[in-house]
Image (cartoon, coloured by chain):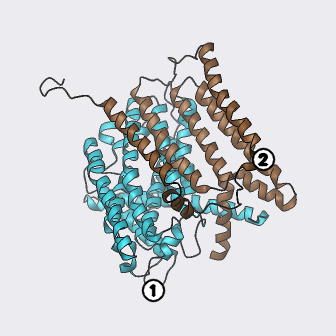
């Protein structure tokens, strides 16, 4: 019985994590054209990311905007699953959904905020234009570069990345960037403490 | 992956089994918890309905199903109804990578423990959404507490698990169990007692159970983040709380208590026996210790558990370097 159940559950992750990747396998069993299904999964995740991003930007309510952000992170995690790197996908969820969004919520709660969100206004057209520029310029710089040098992109081998290899890479080949990132985080943390630091008033007149 | 219609049916069966486990667990645990509470506090507990009160949880859930859904005014509708669903469904996923038996492994996910930790974050997300959307000051206070508590207790919890992962060199739960022996002195608890202790304390904090149940402290916040929920909304929160308890107990059994391995005959019965022993421990301390104050709760974490877990991790690394 256990031999029977094992493969059942084996297929379950695929079904839950990337339904379309699962569908893709299902289709490829009967039809050629796996690539079409992969593209469909890609399109779904792009839609999720864009939808979440739009919700985050357009929402008049900070908590709903945060939920849009969560949706975007989920879409990005799906992208990582599609790229066969579950480690990154889980880390995306663990750090961004489990910690960053939760802290954003904490920051929201420190502001005065009501469920109706009537205090929020949409930005003026000029600000919107600047935002659009900020979004399009990096795309305009990076996308042509990627397209021109498409043949020089590293060849990705099929199959999930071994987490052990990832860890070894972080402490050998990529140790300098890895440590630099920790320094940036340390500086950010020290800066946050410095900004938030305020000497407590003398005892007796603290009320 | 080769998939067919059969495997599709199998998937549905597996999900149904997990739902069955979650619901059955909640029904049994409600009864056990009330009986244990009664025993500890020298009162009979439920005894009216059925023989020694065994039908009580069924009656309770029937009552819960039949209750009117009360919706407070001026709420955020979408989030209000999304929150209980978000509390319940991710927990389903979390049971997949757990090796219940030698072959009865949910999924052979390479990074099983990461999957559990990653999706556990949705629990606190649902708590804060529930507290915020219900337009209630107690709900909001409960949500604020849930945030700072679970962010704090997640760190020593992960660090304690990481110490075991250091030793076994794998994030796969099945492999961690496979590296432990059948007898109690071959379990990870013997070589990682400090990590076990840290995990045990922080799992109580992580599941919002007394003495660390500040997000829903009845005497201060009525019911905290789920104050405004009634009927099925409340039932879903309730169900997911018990499912979360079961989950952390299973992870504890897997990481520290040898999982499905046990004296004489390995099998899923050992996993369940160990997990329910941990569950009993959680229930036991709930009815034994008074609730801590919120600053005490955070001080325990940041000033004791976190440094201890860092020291433990550091010692583990040094000792492993010396031995190998």
Q: Which residue is nearer to you in this view: A102 or B92? A: A102
Q: Which quarter of the rendered picture does the C terminus of chain A lie within?
A: top left
Instruction: Determine the CA span between mark 1 and mark 2.
Output: 52 Å
Q: Quadrant of the N terminus of chain A?
A: bottom right
Report the residue at 46% width, 39% height from top.
A102
Which residue is at a point 57% across and 50% down the rendered structure image?
B89
Q: Which mark is residue B300?
A: none
Estimate how packed mark 2 is, as few (under 14), some (14 to 19) or many (20 or more) residues with alpha carbons within 10 Å.
some
Q: As rendered, which of B36 and B94 lies closer to the eye? A: B94
Chain letter matching colour brown? A
In the drawing, what numbered circle is on residue A39?
Answer: 2
| Rendering colour (chain B) | cyan
Image x and y of residue A41, in percent? 74, 47
Left or right? Give the position of B262 relative to A124.
left
Q: Which element is circle 1 on? A: loop
B236 versus A11 height, above or below: above
Residue B47 showing in the rendered view: no
**Residue with the most extreme left position:** A204
Is residue A147 shown to the viewer in this render?
A: yes
Element under disc 2? helix
User: For the point 49% across and 29% down, which residue is it?
Assistant: B72
Up-down relation of residue A205 to residue A169 (above or below): above
- Judge left or right: residue A19 versus residue B19: right
Q: Hey, which residue is sitting farthest right in the picture?
A: A31
The residue nearer to you, when weighing A149 against B11, is A149
Q: Is residue A104 above or below residue B60?
A: above
Q: Whole-percent x and y of residue A186?
A: 38, 42
Image disc number at residue B264:
1
Labels 1 and 2 share a subunit: no
């Amino acid at each position: 019985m256990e031999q029977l159940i094992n493969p059942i559950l084996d297929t379950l992750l695929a079904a839950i994590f990337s339904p379309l990747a699962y569908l893709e396998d299902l289709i490829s069993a009967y039809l050629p054209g796996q690539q079409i299904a992969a593209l469909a999964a890609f399109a779904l995740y792009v839609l999720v990311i864009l939808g979440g991003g739009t919700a985050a930007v357009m929402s008049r309510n900070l908590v709903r905007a945060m939920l849009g952000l969560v949706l975007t992170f989920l879409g990005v995690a799906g992208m990582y699953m599609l790229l066969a790197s579950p480690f990154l996908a889980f880390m995306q969820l663990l750090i961004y959904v489990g910690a960053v969004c939760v802290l954003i919520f904490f920051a929201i709660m420190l502001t005065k905020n009501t469920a109706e969100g009537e205090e929020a206004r949409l930005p003026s057209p000029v600000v919107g234009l600047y935002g659009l520029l900020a979004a399009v310029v990096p795309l305009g710089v990076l996308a042509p570069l990627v397209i021109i040098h498409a043949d020089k992109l590293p060849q990705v081998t099929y199959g999930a990345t071994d987490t052990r290899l990832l860890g070894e890479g972080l402490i050998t080949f990529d140790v300098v960037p890895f440590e630099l990132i920790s320094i940036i985080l340390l500086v950010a943390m020290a800066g946050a403490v410095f900004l938030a630091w305020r000497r407590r008033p003398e005892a007796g007149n603290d009320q | 992956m080769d998939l067919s219609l059969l495997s599709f049916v199998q998937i549905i069966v597996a999900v149904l089994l997990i739902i069955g486990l979650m619901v059955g667990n909640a029904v049994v645990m409600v009864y056990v918890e009330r009986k244990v509470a009664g025993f500890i506090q020298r009162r009979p507990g439920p005894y009216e309905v059925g023989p020694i009160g065994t039908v009580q949880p069924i009656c309770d859930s029937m009552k819960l199903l039949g209750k009117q859904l009360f919706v407070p005014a001026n709420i955020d509708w979408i989030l209000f109804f999304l929150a209980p669903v978000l509390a319940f469904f991710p927990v389903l996923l979390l049971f997949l990578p757990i090796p219940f038996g030698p072959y009865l492994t949910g999924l052979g996910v390479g990074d099983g423990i990461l999957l559990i930790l990653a999706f556990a974050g949705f629990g606190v997300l649902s708590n804060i959404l529930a507290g915020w959307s219900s337009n209630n000051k107690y709900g909001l206070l409960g949500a604020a507490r849930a945030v700072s508590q679970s962010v704090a207790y997640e760190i020593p919890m992960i660090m304690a698990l990481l110490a075991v992962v250091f030793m076994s060199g794998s994030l796969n739960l099945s492999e961690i169990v496979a590296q432990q022996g059948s007898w109690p002195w071959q379990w990870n608890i013997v070589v990682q007692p400090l990590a076990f202790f840290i995990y045990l304390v922080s799992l109580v904090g992580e599941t919002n159970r007394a003495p660390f149940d500040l997000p829903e402290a009845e005497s201060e916040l009525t019911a905290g983040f789920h104050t405004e929920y009634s009927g099925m909304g409340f039932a879903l929160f309730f169900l997911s709380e018990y499912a979360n308890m079961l989950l952390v107990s299973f992870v504890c059994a897997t990481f520290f208590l040898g999982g499905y391995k046990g004296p004489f005959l390995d099998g899923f019965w050992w996993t369940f026996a160990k997990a329910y022993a941990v569950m009993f421990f959680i229930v036991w301390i709930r009815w034994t210790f008074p609730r801590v104050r919120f600053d005490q709760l955070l001080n325990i974490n940041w000033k004791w558990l976190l440094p201890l877990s860092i020291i433990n991790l550091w010692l583990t690394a040094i000792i492993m370097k010396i031995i190998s």
